[in-house]
């Protein structure tokens, strides 16, 4: 895991897991560092899916939106098609719209563990997915 004061990122059995804890805000330099690490991990290791865990309720900055779009696009270009977004409902919907790039179909989850299980096993139904 490559931690930052603002985020953590790791690869867990082919799943790139990005976590933004409570109070996280991304400055342009934070976003660039996160994106660089995202690309490096995706280049160094096999990544089949992405799980984005956002625990913060802070509004998403322009840098955060740009980072998310570029990261989703970079993952899709590398063949990743399974994306899980874990957050509270209003934030989750906002993140799904922000990640709306060609090739990215994000599944919403309330629970990080359920999202990780789903991301690791393509045949597992998204049981904990909130469908609203």
Image (cartoon, rainbow, N blue to C red):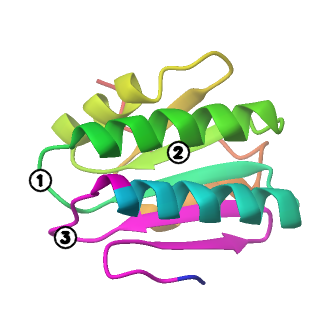
Disc 1: which residue: 58
Furthest toward the front, the residue is 29
Question: Secondary structure beneath disc 2?
Answer: strand
**Camera-side residue of 26 and 110:** 26
Q: Is residue 32 left or right of residue 92?
A: right
Mark 1, secondary structure of its residue? loop
Question: Is any part of residue 83 visible from this angle?
Answer: yes
Pair 3/2: label in front? 3
Badge 1, how many Cα within 10 Å: few under 14, some, many 20+?
few
- Of 96 and 2, the residue lying toward us: 2
What residue sits right under mark 2 in the picture? Answer: 84
Q: Which percent across, then down, holds residue 77? A: 78, 31
Segment tinted magenta in the rendering = 3-28
Please provide percent x and percent y for residue 66. 40, 36
At 83% from the left and 35% from the top, the residue drawn is 79
- Image quadrant where one finds the N terminus: bottom right
Of the two numbered discs 1 and 3 on the same chain, state the one appearing first in sequence: 3
Q: Earlier in the sequence, mark 3 or mark 2?
A: 3
**Mark 3 element type:** loop
Q: Residue at x 74, y 65 (%)?
A: 41
Is residue 29 found inside the magenta-colored segment of the image? no
111 on left or right of 92: right
Q: Residue at x 63, y 31 (%)?
A: 73
Q: Above or below — where is 90 with respect to 40?
A: above
Which quadrant of the view contains residue 97? top left
Disc 3 to disc 2: CB gap under 8 Å: no
Quick check: is 22 in the magenta stretch?
A: yes
The dot on residue 22 is 3
**Callout 3 crowding tier (Cα within 10 Å): few <14, some 14–19, many ≥20:** few
Residue in the foreground of this view, choosing between 66 and 55: 66
Left or right: 23 in relation to 100: left
Q: Position of residue 59 (x, y in %)?
A: 13, 45
């Amino acid at each position: 895991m490559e931690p930052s004061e603002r985020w953590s990122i790791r690869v867990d059995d082919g799943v790139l897991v990005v976590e933004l804890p409570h109070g996280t805000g991304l400055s342009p330099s934070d976003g660039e560092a996160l994106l660089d690490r995202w690309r490096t991990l995706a280049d160094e290791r096999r990544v089949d899916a992405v799980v984005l865990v956002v625990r913060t309720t802070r509004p998403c900055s322009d840098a955060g939106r740009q980072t998310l779009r570029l990261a989703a696009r970079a993952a899709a270009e590398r063949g990743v098609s399974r994306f899980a977004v874990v957050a509270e409902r209003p934030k989750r919907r906002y993140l799904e719209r922000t990640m709306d790039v060609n090739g990215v179909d994000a599944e919403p989850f309330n629970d990080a563990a359920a999202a990780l299980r789903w991301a690791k096993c393509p045949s597992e139904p998204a049981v904990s997915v909130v469908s609203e």
